[in-house]
Amino acid sequence: MGKGKRLEDMILRSRYKNISQFSKAAGVPYTTIKSFIDRDLERASIDSVLKVANTLGVKIEDLVEEGNKVAEKKSAYTISSQYNYLPTSISAGLPLTVDGIDHAEKISVPDSIMGKWAGDSDIYMMRINGESMNKIIPHGSIIAIKPTDCNLLKDGDIVVYSDNHDYSVKKYFRDDNRIIFRPDSHDKRFYDYVTSDNNENLVIHGKVVVYIVELD
């Protein structure tokens, strides 16, 4: 059975009974789910796949594995953990004000992706928006953020920070009483953001420990 047909069967067997009701519950457009079914989930965004899997109460692998591999690999690949997910993108360009950051959804991510960070209840997820870190993290990637004491940060760590509620993602460097947030981009128009360590509006929210990239 193909991945699209398996997804359709899961939806029809669920308590939602049809694709229209399921799409409303999952927060994924009807046309997107129909496209998943018709195209066997090819070019499916990880955001939408996570929402579909969570609404069905299944693991991502149960959706994306080929039919003849699901049974063989289920015990090895379906261990997942849930994390808070903040659906508003944060900026990897100029700092961007994030509204509604206190409203978190839950997403399930396979432990095989999270590695040593699997199951860490402190970790939360966001989507990156912008090109100033595109040598490492492409635009649109999902990042896992681990709250970290500033004293434990090392030069070159990638962090999420805010200055007066403006959020951004950059590499962290310390130079005496200066803190430097440095881009890592193919675009030379991006430049360092420098502030002092006594900046009362500066908050370093955490270190990026994992990122998930969607391939074209």
Image (cartoon, rainbow, N blue to C red):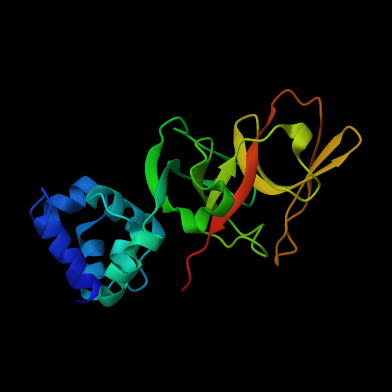
Rendered location of residue 201, percent (x, y): 69, 26
Kindly give the residue lying farthest to the left in the view shown: 17
Is residue 77 positioned above or below 65 on the image? Answer: above
At a point 27% along the width and 54% down the height, the residue shown is: 58
Q: Nearer the viewer, residue 214 or 61?
A: 61
Is residue 141 positioned above or below 3 on the image? Answer: above
At a point 58% along the width and 56% down the height, the residue shown is: 130
Is residue 65 positioned above or below 94 on the image? Answer: below
Rendered location of residue 154, percent (x, y): 79, 44
At a point 64% along the width and 47% down the height, the residue shown is: 169
Residue 33 in view of the camera? yes
Q: Is residue 3 left or right of residue 114?
A: left
Q: Is residue 75 left or right of residue 120?
A: left
Picture quadrant where residue 7 is located: bottom left
* Numbered circles on residues, count: 0
Residue 95 in view of the camera? no
Q: Nearer the viewer, residue 160 or 59?
A: 59
Rendered location of residue 97, percent (x, y): 55, 37
Picture quadrant where residue 207 is located: top right
Rendered location of residue 18, percent (x, y): 9, 56
Name the quarter where the N terminus is drawn: bottom left
Q: Is residue 183 left or right of residue 106?
A: right
